[in-house]
């Protein structure tokens, strides 16, 4: 076992949150796929993290650019409540509360982007295995990502001036934040709208929303407690549970 794995194991063990399987890898195809294979063997708590992915993916199977040096982490959650869209929101909110990130002014872009005024610095991918078991993948930009490789504004924790970044500490805090989010979710996400809207990117701003039947534009008013988006359009208030939100002044 290498030094970083031993360090991470100790942090999680001291917090009484050591998973059954803990793997740190220099490179992998996809940490979500790694966790899926381990889950098939009957394991219930898993943490896999890599410094690079060759086939990383995001929402709707879009490519997740995964250059070397960042955090690509996946874990397995078993919930009492049937999985729905609120889980990703809870995960994002709990990540923002991580001790290492407390000094930063961070946001969440519905439904699963870790955001800031400077752009996206991370993302969340939730892939259900069953109604009560899900793989959670999180990608975090520690270092700048070349803008030519991505199709939206992006930043990194380094560019957001997070000093003395400890990769192992961040991995531990991410894992514990995801576990804590599962607890919030199993307690029916109390006051979700108020908590999310406090950090919501583009709130009360002009946005475009891509949904299953087309596009609409209007003012993003935040979310409701069930996780749905509220858009004030020229035709009135519209509510959506699935889709893609973007600011009208930013790339798709």
Image (cartoon, rainbow, N blue to C red):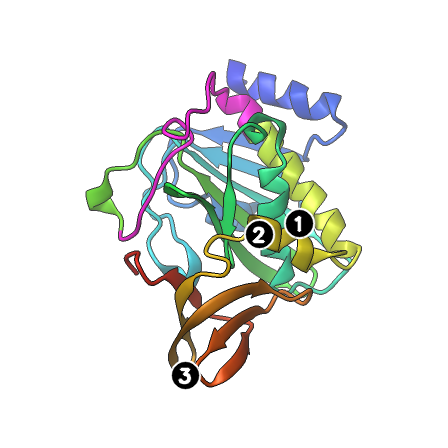
Q: Earlier in the sequence, mark 2 or mark 1?
A: 1
Of 158 and 3, nearer the camera is: 158
Callout 1–callout 3 Cβ contact below 8 Å = no
Q: Residue at the spot x=74%, y=25% of the render?
A: 15
50 within the magenta span? no
Outermost residue toward the left? 148
Boundaries of the magenta span: 151-170
For residue 150, side relative to residue 232 (left or right): left
Q: Residue at the spot x=52%, y=14% of the render?
A: 3
Q: Earlier in the sequence, mark 1 or mark 3?
A: 1
Task: Provide the residue designation for mark 1.
Answer: 77
Q: Earlier in the sequence, mark 2 or mark 3?
A: 2
Callout 2–callout 1 Cβ contact below 8 Å = yes
Mark 2: few/some/many CA within 10 Å (<14, 14-19, 20+): many
Of 56 and 161, nearer the camera is: 161
Q: Residue at the spot x=51%, y=31% of the render?
A: 104
Outermost residue toward the bottom? 235
Mark 3: few/some/many CA within 10 Å (<14, 14-19, 20+): few
Magenta segment's dominant SS is loop
For residue 189, side relative to residue 164 (left or right): right
**Which mark, by number, is residue 19?**
none
Quadrant where the N terminus sits is top right
Task: Provide the residue designation for mark 2.
Answer: 135
Residue 210, quarter of picture: bottom left
Q: Secondary structure at mark 3?
A: loop
What x and y, as percent, mark residue 108? Answer: 51, 49
Task: Provide the residue designation for mark 3.
Answer: 213
């Amino acid at each position: 076992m290498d030094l970083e794995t031993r360090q991470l194991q100790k942090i999680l063990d001291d917090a009484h949150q050591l998973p059954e399987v803990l793997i740190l890898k220099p490179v992998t195809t996809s940490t979500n796929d790694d966790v899926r294979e381990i889950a098939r063997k009957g394991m219930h708590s898993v943490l896999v993290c890599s410094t690079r992915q060759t086939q990383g993916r995001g929402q709707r199977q879009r490519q997740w650019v995964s250059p070397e040096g960042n955090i690509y982490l996946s874990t397995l959650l078993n919930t009492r409540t049937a999985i729905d869209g609120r889980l990703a929101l809870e995960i994002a909110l709990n990540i923002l509360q991580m001790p290492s990130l407390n000094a930063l002014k961070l946001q969440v872009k519905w439904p699963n982007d870790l955001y800031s005024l400077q752009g996206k610095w991370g993302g969340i991918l939730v892939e259900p295995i069953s109604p009560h078991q899900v793989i959670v993948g999180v990608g975090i930009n520690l270092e700048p990502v070349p803008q030519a490789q991505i199709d939206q504004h992006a930043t990194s924790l380094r560019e957001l001036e997070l000093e003395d970044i400890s990769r192992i500490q961040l991995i531990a805090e991410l894992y514990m934040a995801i576990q804590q989010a599962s607890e919030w979710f199993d307690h029916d996400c109390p006051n979700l709208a108020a908590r999310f809207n406090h950090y919501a990117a583009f709130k009360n701003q002009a946005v475009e929303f891509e949904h299953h039947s087309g596009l609409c534009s209007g003012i993003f008013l935040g979310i409701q407690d069930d996780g749905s988006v509220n858009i004030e359009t020229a035709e009135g208030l519209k509510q959506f549970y699935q889709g893609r939100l973007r600011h009208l002044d930013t790339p798709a």
